[in-house]
Image (cartoon, grey):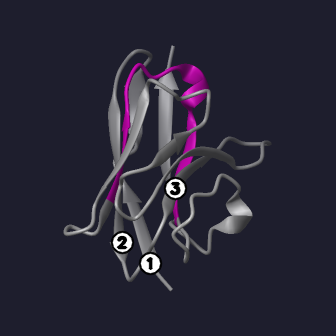
Amino acid sequence: QAQLVESGGGLVQAGGSLRLTCLVLGRTFAMGWFRQTPGKEREFVATITWSGGNTVYADSVKGRFTISRDNVKKTLYLQMNSLKPEDTGVYYCAARRTVDLAITQREYADWGQGTQVTVSS
């Protein structure tokens, strides 16, 4: 079981950037980022393999967000550029116990507590 601790959220104007960080305590394989807004289900944002060689993004963030990881530092990142008000939400990092990428939350075993991102118009 892995423990995940997110940080880096905050308030930013539309068009701005933020970088989210997820510190990983324990062993993980593929990892991902999800987000949730009030009244909506948690939605997939991006996922990455253990090596970092393969990534998948939601269409809504493709070309604006970049997922990466540093396994030496045991850290997962989400660089978010050209932010829009609709990117507002609580962002969660998640870890799988297999090497395969996945885009549904039920395929992830371990979750962080979330970090709030608010994009003002």
x and y, in percent, of residue 69 in the image: 31, 56
Residue beneath label 3, please?
32
- 116 vs 49: above or below: above
Mark 1: secondary structure: strand
Assess disc 3: are there few (<14), some (14-19) or many (≥20) residues with their C-alpha within 10 Å of its C-alpha.
many
- Residue at image position (50%, 66%) is 112
Residue beneath label 2, please?
24
Sequence-first disc among 3 and 1: 1
x and y, in percent, of residue 80 in the image: 39, 32
Decide if residue 36 is in sight here: yes
Mark 3: secondary structure: strand
- 93 vs 25: above or below: above
> Residue 29's image quarter?
bottom left
Amino acid under disc 3: Gly
Q: Are marks 2 and 3 in contact (CB under 8 Å)?
A: no
The label nearer to you, 2 versus 3, is 3
Mark 1 vs mark 2, CA separation in Å: 6 Å
Tell whether position 79 is magenta. Answer: yes
Residue beneath label 1, please?
3
Nearer-the-camera pick, 16 or 66: 66
Sequence-first disc among 1 and 2: 1
x and y, in percent, of residue 11 in the image: 41, 32
Mark 2: secondary structure: strand
Amino acid under disc 1: Gln
> Residue 76's image quarter?
bottom left
What span is in magenta? 76-94
Q: Residue furthest bottom?
A: 1
Sequence-first disc among 2 and 3: 2
- Residue at image position (34%, 49%) is 68
